[in-house]
């Protein structure tokens, strides 16, 4: 039995170090030794595991001048050696790498388009613990890209299905379901429990929160996003890397950037970018190759081109800069809150409110700002159609004095349209919250949903 004291003595004798490492390797342990003086407590090699770090800190507190962290990796069973045999013959992975994966913990936030392939490949690769955070149910329109789910799953909780599916694929790994919303109260403890985070979210508030929590915890944030025929991926935060806010310091106003529910997305994009995220996660866990940190990968499916944008840490970044203005996740959540709407210009109304106003005979203009084919597919009776892209040039077609209710598919483009109209002197503007989808759901289910 190797006692910590014996290891300590061995390590403190320089001539013994090589022998000592060889001896531990013989025991099947992957070892990384780091010296940690009292002046620099907590400075350990990246590969050191948490338990060893904690033990080393205790030794420091007890007055030892030098200490080290030893990394004992979990054994692989015979079944695991068979299952991962194609990994084991790669010299870059081999047994020690596979053991490292077995010990690793990855949090996937969002079990949607990006999360689906990422979770499946991480489970197949043998990442020992995979946390899945999601609080949505499966919808029929998800199945075009979210390959974790099948038609029978519509209406069921994604997080439960994702965990079940991952466990079926590989019973050797542990999948943990986190069904709560990732917000300021939960994000820090979630991130703390994992080695890295895969961001598979589709909203800005959560994306910024994950970024900031990863910066605070010093953990890598493997980012991906898709829209229409384009995708992006990068590795932010952790190890002095630039973070998402170095690229985009603040969330866009009123979610002015359209999302996939609004602008559409080619389903296969989710697979491609999600697999790139899983690849980066595996490389980081194995400590091989060069990560996508300091680089933003841009993929354009139409031209089948990959481009890379060089990124560097921004000294003025509000979260990882030299004088950060955001120092806690609570401050981060406030900075991501929905910004105030332009003064006096607009308010939201629900589909039910709109219906009751229309049936009471109230005069109002219903303005549909979706594209032509969407308007042809379904629209609210009596609506005037001006696509958002044409609104600037055709705003004069709308009566400035009338009360106007603007709608689109889900409420994002209509917010943008309201900004455009408000800037041109319209002041009786309201936004149909949830767009025509909420109208179809709550008022007129006979219209086709899409
Ligand atoms: Zn930053």
Image (cartoon, rainbow, N blue to C red):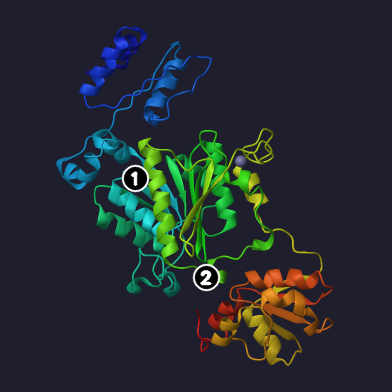
Q: Is residue 117 left or right of residue 431?
A: left
Kindly indicate the quadrant of the structure image that contains residue 13.
top left
| Residue found at x 66% / y 47% | 249
Q: Is residue 130 left or right of residue 297?
A: left
- State how many labels appear: 2
Residue 258, position as x, y percentages in the image: 60, 66
| Residue found at x 34% / y 45% | 129
Q: Nearer the viewer, mark 1 or mark 2?
A: 2
Q: Is residue 387 left or right of residue 422?
A: left
Relative to 417, is 198 above or below? above
Name the element at disc 1: strand
Q: CA distance from mark 1 to mark 2?
A: 33 Å
Disc number placed over residue 199 in the picture, else none: none
The numbered mark, 1 or 2, whose residue comes first in the sequence reads: 1
For residue 285, say whether it is visible: yes
Disc number placed over residue 129 in the picture, else none: 1
Q: Is residue 317 left or right of residue 36?
A: right
Residue 76, position as x, y percentages in the image: 21, 38
Kindly indicate the quadrant of the structure image that contains residue 394.
bottom right
Graded by Cα atoms within 10 Å as few (under 14), some (14 to 19) or many (20 or more), the crowding at tag 2 reads few
| Residue found at x 32% / y 45% | 127
> Is label 2's Cβ within 8 Å of ligand 1?
no
Disc number placed over residue 264 in the picture, else none: 2
């Amino acid at each position: 039995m190797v006692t910590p004291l014996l290891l300590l003595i061995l390590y403190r004798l320089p001539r013994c170090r090589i022998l000592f490492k060889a001896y531990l390797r013989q025991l099947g342990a992957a070892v990384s030794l780091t010296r940690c003086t009292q002046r620099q407590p907590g400075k350990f090699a990246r590969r050191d595991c948490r338990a060893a770090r904690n033990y080393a800190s205790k030794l420091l507190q007890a007055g030892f001048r030098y200490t080290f962290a030893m990394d004992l990796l979990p054994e692989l069973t015979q079944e695991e050696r068979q299952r991962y045999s194609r990994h084991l013959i790669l010299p870059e992975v081999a047994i020690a790498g596979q053991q490292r994966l077995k010990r690793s913990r990855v949090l996937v936030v969002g079990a949607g388009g990006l999360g689906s392939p990422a979770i499946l490949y991480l489970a197949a690769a043998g990442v020992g613990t995979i946390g899945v955070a999601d609080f949505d149910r499966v919808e029929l329109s998800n199945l075009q890209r979210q390959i974790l789910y099948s038609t029978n799953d519509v209406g069921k909780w994604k997080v439960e299905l994702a965990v079940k599916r991952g466990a079926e694929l590989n019973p050797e790994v542990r999948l943990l379901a986190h069904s709560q919303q990732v917000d300021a109260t939960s994000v820090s403890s979630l991130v703390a429990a994992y080695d890295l985070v895969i961001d598979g979210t589709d909203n800005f508030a959560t994306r910024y929160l994950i970024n900031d929590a990863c910066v605070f915890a010093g953990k890598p944030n493997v980012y991906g996003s898709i829209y229409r025929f384009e995708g992006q991926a990068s590795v932010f935060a952790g190890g002095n890397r630039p973070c998402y806010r170095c690229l985009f310091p603040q969330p866009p106003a009123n979610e002015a950037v359209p999302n996939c529910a609004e602008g559409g997305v080619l389903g296969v994009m989710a697979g491609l970018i999600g697999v790139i995220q899983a690849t980066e996660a595996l490389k980081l866990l194995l400590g091989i190759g060069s990560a996508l940190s300091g680089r933003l990968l841009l993929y354009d499916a139409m031209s089948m081109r990959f481009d890379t944008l060089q990124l560097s840490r921004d000294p003025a970044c509000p979260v990882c800069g030299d004088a950060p203005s955001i120092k806690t996740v609570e401050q981060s959540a406030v900075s991501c809150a929905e910004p105030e709407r332009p003064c006096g210009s607009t308010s939201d109304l629900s589909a039910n409110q709109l219906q009751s106003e229309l049936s009471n005979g109230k005069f109002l203009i219903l303005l549909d700002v979706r594209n032509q084919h969407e308007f042809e597919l379904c629209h609210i009776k009596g609506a005037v159609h001006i696509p958002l892209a044409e609104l600037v040039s055709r705003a004069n077609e709308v009566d400035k004095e009338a009360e106007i209710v603007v709608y689109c598919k889900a409420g994002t483009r209509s917010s943008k349209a309201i900004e455009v109209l408000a800037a041109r002197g319209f002041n009786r503007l309201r936004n149909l919250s949830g767009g025509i989808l909420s109208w179809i759901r709550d008022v007129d289910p006979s219209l086709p949903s899409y």
